[in-house]
Structures are given as C-alpha cells and as structure tokens.
Image: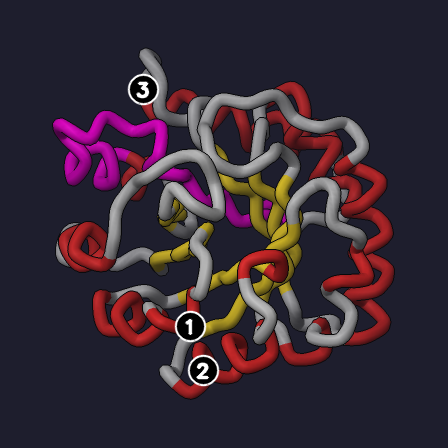
C-alpha cells in the first residue's frame, strides 16, 4: 500500500445525501474526511460550522480533518474540537497568533495543523514546523472547489519535505487543491503524505471506482 492518505473534501459531495456519500467514501477505503470551513471573510465563500461537523461525526468513525479558512480561528477551536474534529488546521495568514492557536489545539487533545496559501512563502511555516502534526500547502487559492492545480506547488512540496525531514519527521505534509488522477503521482513522488481530493472522488462515477483510479496512479508511479 502506498504511504499516502486520501482525505476526500465534502465540499464537492452531494449535500442532499451527505451521510450516504461519506459512507460510500469510507467503504471505498479513504483514510480521513476533510471538512472545509469557510467564513466568507478569509475566503470568498461560506460553508458550515461545528453543527455539521457534529452531524458527520455521528455517521463515520474516520478521522475528521477540519480545515479552518476563517479569521480569528482561536475563537472557535473549542467548538470544533467538541464537535468531533480529530485534526484542526488554521491558516498562518488568518491570525497573528498562530503559535497560540497551535497550542490551543493541542490542549484540546487534537492534532494541530498550519496551512499556507500559494503566494505565502514556505518560511511562514518554519517557526512552528517542529511543533506541528500537519503542514498544509494549498495548491489552489482557497475558497472554491474544482480549481486547477497550480504547477509551482510541486516544487514547494519538495522543499517542504526536505525541511520537514530535518526539523520534524513525524509532521505530515498535506496538499489541497486540484488533485486529480493525472497529478496525484506527481505530488506523491514530491513528498506528500495526505492528499485532499474533491471532485476527483465525488462526481458522477462511483466513489469506489474513483478511489481505485486515484491509487492506481500512485501504485504505477512506484516507490518514492
């Protein structure tokens, strides 16, 4: 099995049958469920809050990977932790107190992640990298699903992998945005541990077929 976790984003799922789609994904062998929380301020879109996370917690035992694309995330960390999040990621650009936020997440007994946008230098991650459980590189500009992968992200993954291996080998590297069968092997070989996948899994085809196609590309790429 490739050393790669697949975390489907429910942003592109059918919300009219969200529980069913999550169960389909779980049966297909996904590893986490990725929840994109947007506030309409940090990103130009509005999604959902802790109540939806709590509802999803009731229909799956998979780890819930909550990605907070919101300003002042410190105000809501406890709410999302109590709702059932296992991993909570905040954006370096969304708070002047990223270190405090990471500490708060850990105090809640959750895994802590820090995310950066495509135009944010990798150096923004370095002060906290030794303390992180997850480092998230956005490979699209956050706010909407279905966007095209930014090609320069691959080199950023390689650079982050080298820094991670030096400073905190147990920290997972996650990439989010535009991941498809045609580029999943590329990001895997570059050093990613977790891929967030949306429309490539939740579309008109069975989730199980899409999962097999995705992992098939990783298998074909061979070991990294």
Image check: 98 left or right of 143? right
The crowding category of the residue bearing disc 1, from other C-alpha atoms within 10 Å (few below 14, some 14 to 19, many at least 20), is some
Residue drawn at the location 77% of the way across and 40% of the way down = 189
Residue that protrudes farthest toward the top in the picture? 204
Disc 3, disc 2: CB below 8 Å? Answer: no
Mark 3 or mark 2: whose residue is earlier in sequence: 2
Mark 3 or mark 1: whose residue is earlier in sequence: 1
Q: In which quarter of the image is the C terminus?
A: top right
Please give the range of residues in magenta.
1-24
Camera-nearest residue between 208 and 157: 157
Cα distance in 3D space between marks 3 and 2: 39 Å
- Expressed as whole percent of the image width and height from the top left, the position of residue 199 reads 43, 23
Residue position marked by numbered label 1 in the rendering:
74
Residue position marked by numbered label 2 in the rendering:
104
- Expressed as whole percent of the image width and height from the top left, the position of residue 97 reads 57, 75
Q: Is residue 17 magenta?
A: yes
Camera-nearest residue between 184 and 106: 106
Disc 1, disc 2: CB below 8 Å? Answer: yes
- Expressed as whole percent of the image width and height from the top left, the position of residue 57 reads 20, 58
State the image quarter where residue 171 is shown: bottom right
Image check: 217 left or right of 201? right
Cα distance in 3D space between marks 1 and 2: 8 Å
Residue position marked by numbered label 3 in the rendering:
206
Secondary structure under tag 2 reads helix
Residue drawn at the location 53% of the way across and 49% of the way down = 5
Disc 3, disc 1: CB below 8 Å? Answer: no
């Amino acid at each position: 099995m490739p050393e790669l976790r697949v975390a489907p984003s429910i942003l592109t799922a059918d919300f009219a049958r969200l529980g069913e789609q999550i169960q389909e994904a779980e049966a297909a062998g996904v590893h986490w469920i990725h929840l994109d929380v947007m506030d309409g301020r940090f990103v130009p879109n509005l999604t959902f809050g802790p109540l939806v996370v709590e509802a999803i917690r009731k229909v799956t035992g998979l780890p819930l990977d909550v990605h907070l694309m919101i300003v002042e995330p410190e105000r809501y960390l406890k709410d999302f932790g109590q709702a059932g999040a296992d991993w909570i990621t905040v954006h370096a650009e969304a708070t002047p107190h990223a270190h405090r936020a990471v500490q708060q997440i850990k105090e809640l007994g959750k895994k802590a992640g820090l995310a950066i946008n495509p135009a944010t230098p990798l150096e923004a991650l370095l002060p906290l990298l030794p303390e992180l459980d997850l480092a998230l590189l956005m490979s699209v500009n956050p706010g909407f699903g279905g966007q095209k992968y930014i090609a320069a992200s691959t080199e950023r993954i390689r650079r982050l992998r080298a820094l991670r291996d030096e400073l905190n080998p147990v920290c997972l590297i996650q990439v989010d945005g535009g991941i498809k069968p045609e580029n999943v092997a590329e990001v895997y070989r570059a050093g990613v541990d977790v891929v967030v996948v949306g429309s490539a899994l939740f579309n008109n085809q069975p989730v199980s077929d899409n999962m097999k196609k995705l992992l098939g590309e990783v298998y074909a790429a061979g070991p990294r």
